[in-house]
Amino acid sequence: EDQVTQSPEALRLQEGESSSLNCSYTVSGLRGLFWYRQDPGKGPEFLFTLYSAGEEKEKERLKATLTKKESFLHITAPKPEDSATYLCAVPSQGAQKLVFGQGTRLTINP
Amino acid sequence: GAVVSQHPSWVICKSGTSVKIECRSLDFQATTMFWYRQFPKQSLMLMATSNEGSKATYEQGVEKDKFLINHASLTLSTLTVTSAHPEDSSFYICSAEQGPGNTIYFGEGSWLTVV
C-alpha cells in the first residue's frame, strides 16, 4: 500500500535557525514526489516536484532533495513568513490520486 | 505556476439547501480534477476524482448522491453539496492536473458554512 510519512509533526524554530523536514514514502514505481506549502485557510501552494533519486531543487530559502526512500525539505535561515504547514505527496501507484503525508507544521519565531 | 481558481471563496447556506462550488483551471486544460475536504488542523481528505466527460470516481465513504461532481469541460469542474446539513460545513479544495504525471495545482479553497 502506498504510504507517505512526514516528520516531525510540528517544528518550532527561531528566525535564522536552519533545519530539515522529512518525508518518507513507500510506493512502487515512483512517478514524482511533490512538496506543497499550505497557509491556514488556504489551498496548498505548489513548491517542487522531484522525479529521481539524487535530484535537488531550490527556491529562495528552500531546497528539496530526494533519495530512493525519502525526501528532505531543507530550510536555510528561515524567516517568520516561512511559517506554514508543509505537505509532501506522491502519485498513487494503483489509483489516479495523490497520497499525502500528514504535514509538518512549521513555526518560525522572530 | 499554473492557476486554479475556486468560487466562491466562502458561502453560507441554510440547512436543506444545495450549494455549488466551481473550480477552474485558468491557464491550462485539466484532464483530471480532484475534490478534497479538510477539517481544521487535519490533512486533505480526497473526496473524488473526475475526468473530463466521465463520471467522477468517489472515495470510499463519500456519498455520491450528496456530493455531485461535474467535469463538463477541460477547464471547469463543479461540486454541488445537496441538501446541506451543518456537518457538511468544511473547507473544500479542488486541484487540477494537466495530464498524467504532471504537477497537480490546487485552488484557494472554499469555506462552506451550513446554518
Image (tube, helix red, strand yellow):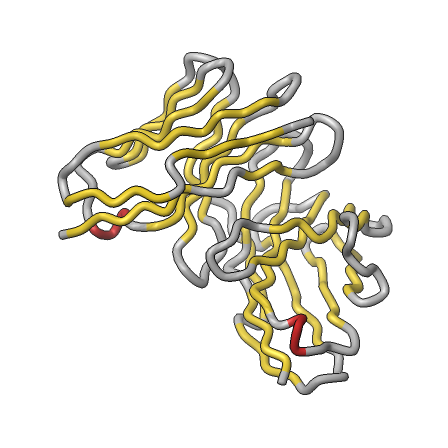
Residue A16, horizontal then vertical, whole percent: 13, 39
The vertical placement of A7 against B81, above or below, is: above
Quadrant for residue B97, please give it.
top right
Q: Nearer the viewer, residue B62 or A97?
A: B62
Q: Nearer the viewer, residue B112 or B76?
A: B112
Residue drawn at (39%, 29%), measured in percent from left and top?
Answer: A22
Residue drawn at (66%, 49%), measured in percent from left and top?
Answer: B46
Is residue B101 left or right of A46 when viewed as pictured? right
* Numbered-mark total: 0
Quadrant for residue A2, please give it.
top right
Residue B78, horizontal then vertical, whole percent: 72, 63
The vertical placement of A42 against A36, above or below, is: below
Residue drawn at (69%, 58%), measured in percent from left and top?
Answer: B76
The vertical placement of A68 against A74, above or below, is: above
Residue A30, horizontal then vertical, whole percent: 60, 20
Residue drawn at (22%, 48%), measured in percent from left and top?
Answer: A108
Quarter of the N terminus of chain A within the rendering: top right
Quadrant for residue B63, please give it.
bottom right
Q: Nearer the viewer, residue A5 or B105?
A: A5
